[in-house]
Amino acid sequence: GAGVSQSPRYKVAKRGQDVALRCDPISGHVSLFWYQQALGQGPEFLTYFQNEAQLDKSGLPSDRFFAERPEGSVSTLKIQRTQQEDSAVYLCASSDSGSRTKNIQYFGAGTRLSVL
Amino acid sequence: AQSVSQHNHHVILSEAASLELGCNYSYGGTVNLFWYVQYPGQHLQLLLKYFSGDPLVKGIKGFEAEFIKSKFSFNLRKPSVQWSDTAEYFCAVNAGKSTFGDGTTLTVKP
C-alpha cells in the first residue's frame, strides 16, 4: 500500500481481555516501530524491529505487552489481560534503510484502544 | 537517556502572525532532530528534519527550524501562519530510537 496501515482503527476491550493490534508497514521498509500515545502526550517508544528481529523492546511497559514481526513485514502488538491504564492510541511507524532516510519514520493512523 | 521538552502546550494566533515553537532536548551525543505535524483527523507526518550541515532547515508549507547546538534547541518558526496550520506539532530527537515531546497545539484564528 501507499502508507502504513493499522487495524483496527478503534478497539474497545473489557478489562482482562487480550487484544491484538496489526500494523502493515510501507512495502520494503526494513524498520518498524511501535509507540503508545496517551491523551495529551507525545508518542512514547515501545519497541523496534529491523526486519524480523526485535532489536529493542525497552519501552514495553510490562510483560503483558508482546510484539512480533515473524516475516519481516506485518507486525502485531499483543496486549494480554488489558488494564484501564493501557487505554491509549497505539502508533506504528516504518522507515527504510537508506542512509539519508533511515531515520525518517512514516506513521500510520493509529489504533485507539479503550479499556473499560 | 534522551528527553525532549516543548515549552508551549497550546498556542493561539491570528492569521498572518509569526510563529515560534520552542523545543529543547537533552542528549550528549549526535542526534537527528525532527518536527512532525498532526492535522485534525490525520496521522503524524514529517514537517522537517535536521541530520547535519546547515543548522537552518526548511520544511514543507513555509516552516523552518534552527538547530542551535549550544542551547540544545531546535525551534520551529513560520513568518506568517494560516488558518490551515491549525494542528498539533511534535518535536522529536532520534539517537537510535525516537523520543517525542508532548506536543504543542496550535490554533490559528481566521
Image: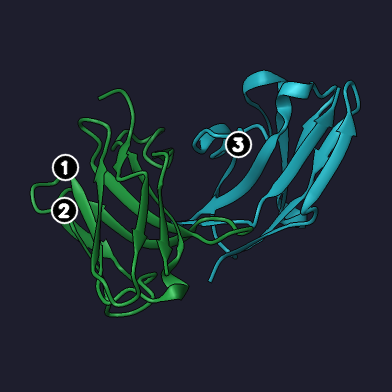
Chain colours: A green, B cyan
On screen, B1 above or below A11? Answer: below
Q: CA distance from mark 2 to mark 1?
A: 6 Å
User: Is residue B75 in sight in this rendering?
Assistant: no
Image quarter (top left, top right, bottom left or bottom right) of the N terminus of chain A: top left
Instruction: Give the Cα distance between marks 2 and 3.
Output: 28 Å
Q: What residue lies at 88% left-to-right and 34% top-to-bottom?
A: B13
- A24 vs B91: above or below: above
Q: Position of residue B96 (x, y in %)?
A: 41, 57
Disc 1 marks a residue whose amino acid type is Ser
Residue A100 figure quarter: top left
- Look at mark 3 in the image and give the residue it sits on: B37
Give SS at disc 1.
loop
Name the subunit of mark 1: A
* Residue at image mark 2: A69
The type of residue carrying mark 2 is Arg
Q: Which disc is residue A31 wearing?
A: none
| Displayed quadrant of residue B2 | bottom right
Q: Nearer the viewer, residue B6 or A104?
A: B6
Kindly identify the residue that appears in the image at 22 percent across and 51 percent down: A50
Q: Does the CB distance between marks 2 and 1 fall below 8 Å?
A: yes
Disc number at residue A73? 1
